[in-house]
Amino acid sequence: MITKLIMGKTIYDSKDTFGGYFEDFSVGNVYKHWPGKTITESDNHLFSLITMNTSPLHIDENYMLNHKHGKILVCGPLVISLIVGMSVSDTSGKAVANLEYESVKHLDPVFIGDTIYSQSEILDCTQTSDKKHGIVYMESVGINQHDEKILSLRRRFLVPCKPDGV
């Protein structure tokens, strides 16, 4: 952690610990992301409507009464966005670019009122030929309040190598 001493006070700047440089990642590292997020009806409705996903599965409570689940399902891309977003401060916060998302699997339904947590494991780290950046490949898993896996996905992102003196 980078700290500064200003007028006799130690200053901790969270931008210094937001995400990682390429050298900070090792295959097998697991990051447990915190805090979790409880999904509200407003979250789901707003996300569904701003993305123009007007499926009754996500916005029509009456329609869902006779459905297999009997209640509204949270929009899948919202869950993906939460899982990725939760990982940013621990992993890709310094990323130059997100390169790829793959193997997205919805493992269990998510409902309004569920609280989602996530964790990520580093699967591969490859330095680029210019030695200034690296590509990090990781798998993130979303887990609900019952400790059930609800989603998994893999992604690659490009991060800088540590600058001299860091």
Image (cartoon, grey):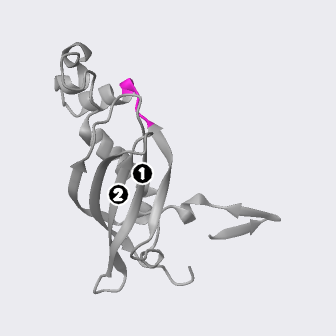
Instruction: Indicate the position of residue 45 as horizontal and vertical percent values.
Output: 30, 25
Cβ–Cβ under 8 Å for marks 1 and 2: yes
Q: Is residue 49 left or right of residue 136?
A: left
Residue 133 occupies quadrant: bottom left
Tell me the magenta residue range.
38-42
What amino acid type should be assigned to the residue bearing mark 1?
Answer: Ser
Residue 148's tag is none
Instruction: Indicate the position of residue 93 as horizontal and vertical percent values.
Output: 44, 61
The residue pinned by badge 1 equals: 118
Q: Would residue 22 be seen by someone viewing this image from the given angle?
A: yes
Please name the residue shown 47% across and 69% down the image: 20
Which image quarter holds the N terminus? bottom right
Answer whether residue 39 is magenta in the image: yes
Q: Nearer the viewer, residue 42 or 133?
A: 42
Find numbered disc 2 in the image and state the secondary structure of the residue it sits on: strand
| Residue 107 higher or lower than 103, as above or below | above
Residue 5 occupies quadrant: bottom right
Q: Is residue 24 left or right of residue 96?
A: right
What amino acid type should be assigned to the residue bearing mark 2?
Answer: Ser
Instruction: Indicate the position of residue 55 as horizontal and vertical percent values.
Output: 16, 26
